[in-house]
Image (spheres, helix red, strand yellow):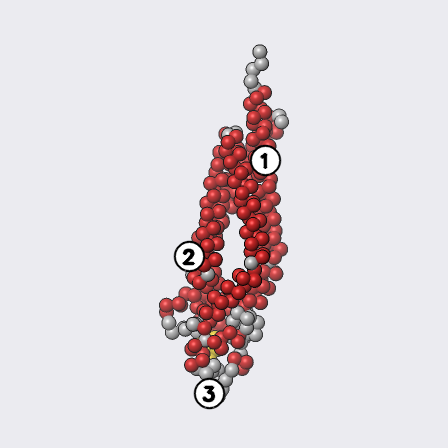
């Protein structure tokens, strides 16, 4: 490989490593966000789900390693250090294998994850109490999810009949965030009383949305599946290109240096 091609490969590899450094920062930030977020559906899950907490720590670890790998790759490419380029290639290969393994694990464990999520949301709905401030952040996050996804409960509004407060009220109130009418945003939390109703009623008479949030989440995933697959494919392609460039540069650095040895 000529010196010109070697320089082009070196700077392309530097660019790829810079992208990986930025990608690692994004992954690290996402993992931290999962742990500290208190205002979305993620906060509902991470408080009760051990799996999600482990996943967040894994993201933080992967992000940190990716940033370190990008830094080492940049240094190795600019200074043409073969050992750093080899280390970069090995780390990139391991990360790619880990990503494929994680994707397969999620795919084959999707039923268990769905059951775990249903249990977490079911417990939250059953113990939902707008008069208790101890779980206010979680309950506000769930109200936000129901409002944004235009859904009610996990499987449907029937989940709310298990709520302790609503049972005490003989189901004469309903969750405000489930309302199928446009309401004031300040009233999208807690329970709203039914008007002109007998002392006892059932959830079928509530003026709420009939779709469960499980269906809403599935619809969101279907609508954004192309974006998700595109991002995953793009990351995999960048990783493969980085591996190819690193191994080519590593090989030809040795060749270039060998040809510079004086012959007598």
Q: Earlier along the polypeptide chain: callout 2 or callout 3? A: 2
What secondary structure is found at the residue carrying circle 2? Answer: helix
Q: How many marks?
A: 3
Q: Is residue 64 above or below residue 1?
A: below
CA–CA distance in space, label 3 to label 1: 73 Å
- Residue 164 visible to the viewer: yes
Q: What's the mark number on residue 98?
A: none
The residue that disc 2 covers is 36
Marks 2 and 3, how far apart at CA: 42 Å
Q: Are marks 2 and 1 in contact (CB under 8 Å)?
A: no
Q: Residues within 10 Å of mark 3 (few under 14, many from 20)?
A: few
At horizontal 48% and vertical 54% (from top left) the residue drawn is 55
Left or right: where 53 falls relative to 103 = left
Residue carrying label 3 = 199
Q: Considering only order in the chain, which callout, 1 or 3, is on the residue closer to the N terminus? A: 3
Q: Secondary structure at mark 3?
A: loop
Picture coordinates of residue 59, whole percent (x, y)? 48, 50
Q: Residues within 10 Å of mark 2 (few under 14, many from 20)?
A: few
* Residue name at image x 52 percent, y 30 percent: 82
Q: Which residue is mark 1?
A: 245
Nearer the observer, 222 or 95: 95
Q: CA distance from mark 2 to mark 1?
A: 38 Å
* Tag 1 secondary structure: helix
Q: Position of residue 197 (x, y in %)?
A: 49, 86
Judge by depth and name the residue closer to the eye, 50 or 42: 50
Q: State whether residue 230 is above or below residue 159.
A: above
Q: Is residue 203 above or below residue 257?
A: below
């Amino acid at each position: 490989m000529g010196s010109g091609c070697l320089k082009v490969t070196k700077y392309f590899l530097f660019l790829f490593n810079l992208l990986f450094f930025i990608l690692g920062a994004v992954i690290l930030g996402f993992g931290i966000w999962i742990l500290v977020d208190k205002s979305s559906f993620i906060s509902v899950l991470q408080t009760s789900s051990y799996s999600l907490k482990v996943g967040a720590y894994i993201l933080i670890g992967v992000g940190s390693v990716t940033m370190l790998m990008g830094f080492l790759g940049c240094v190795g490419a600019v200074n043409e250090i073969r050992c750093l380029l080899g280390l970069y290639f090995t780390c990139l290969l391991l990360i790619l294998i880990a990503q494929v393994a994680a994707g397969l694990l999620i795919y084959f464990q999707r039923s268990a994850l769905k059951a775990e999520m249903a249990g977490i949301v079911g417990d939250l709905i059953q113990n939902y109490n707008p008069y208790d401030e101890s779980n206010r952040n979680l309950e506000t996050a769930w109200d936000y999810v129901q409002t944004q996804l235009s859904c009610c409960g996990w499987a449907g509004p029937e989940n709310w009949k298990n709520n302790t407060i609503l049972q005490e009220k003989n189901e004469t109130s309903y969750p405000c965030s489930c309302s199928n009418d446009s309401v004031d945003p300040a009233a999208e939390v807690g329970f709203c009383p039914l008007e002109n109703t007998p002392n006892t009623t059932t959830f079928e008479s509530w003026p709420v949305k009939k779709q469960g949030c499980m269906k809403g989440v599935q619809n969101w995933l279907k609508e954004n599946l192309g974006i998700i697959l595109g991002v995953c494919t793009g990351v995999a392609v960048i990783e493969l290109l980085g591996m190819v460039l690193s191994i080519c540069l590593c090989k030809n650095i040795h060749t270039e240096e060998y040809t510079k040895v004086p012959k007598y």
